[in-house]
Image: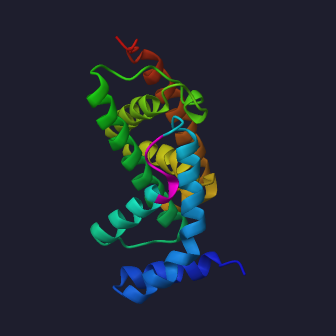
Amino acid sequence: METSPHEITGLLQAWSAGEQGAFEKLVPMVYQELHRLAQHYMSQERPGHTLQATALVNEAYLRLMGGKPISWQNRAHFFGVSAQLMRRILVDFARSRRSVRRGGDAPAVSLDDALVVSPEPGADLVALDDALHALAAMDARRGQVVELRFFGGLSVEETAEVLKVSVETVMHDWKFAKAWLQRELEAAPVDDGS
C-alpha cells in the first residue's frame, strides 16, 4: 500500500513537534525514495566508489537526527533537505579524495554534463558545488531552486511550494540559474591532472 503525501507530512510535523515515535514511523515510509535518490547520486560516481547508496542514506539519517530540529513543511521539503544532505556528504567525500590525491581545481563541466557519468564525476560535483555556492551568495533563492530541482529532484510545483513562490518564479529562477551556472562552469580553470 502506497503512503500518502499527507500522511508523511503529518508525521514530519509531529516529528518537528518532538514526537520521536513519529520519526520511527516515518523511516520505513521514506526509505525507498531516499535510497532511490542515493542510488541516483551513486550512479554518477566512479565505479568502485567506496561509499554505497545504503551508507549514503544512513549518513543522511544520522545528520538529520543529529542536526538542529527542522520545522518540516511537507514531504517535498523533507526530500529537498535530504537531497541537500546527500549532496554535501558526496561533495565532502570528493573534496577529501581530491585533496589527498592532488591539489588543483576541479575540471570545468556544464550543468547538463553534470547529469551524466564522466571520468571524474566527483571532481565535477565539486566544481558544480563551488559554482552553486557562488550563485547562492549572489541570489539565495535561485541557489535554492537549483538545489531543490537538480539535486533534490523536485518538480517545479514542489519547488514553488517549498519556497512559497509562484510556479512562474521558479521557472524564471531555474532558467536564469542554469545559464549563470553554465557560464561559471565553462569559465572554471581546467585541471589536467598534473
Q: Does residue 176 appear anywhere in the picture?
A: yes
Quarter of the figure with residue 138: top left
Which residue shows up at 37% across the image and 79% down it?
Answer: 16
Q: Give the range drawn in magenta.
A: 49-54
Quarter of the figure with residue 129: top left
Q: Nearer the viewer, residue 153 or 33?
A: 33
- Where in the figure is residue 106, as x and y percent of width and height? 38, 23
Quarter of the figure with residue 107: top left
- Where in the figure is residue 13, as x and y percent of width and height? 44, 81
Q: In which quarter of the image is the C terminus?
A: top left
Residue 87 drawn above or below residue 122: below
In magenta segment, residue 117: no
Which residue shows up at 72% across the image and 81% down it?
Answer: 1
Which residue shows up at 49% across the image and 47% down it?
Answer: 145
The main secondary structure of the magenta stretch is: loop
Which residue shows up at 37% across the image and 49% down it?
Answer: 89
Left or right: 129 in relation to 80 = left
- Where in the figure is residue 83, as x and y percent of width and height? 48, 54
Left or right: 186 in relation to 193 = right
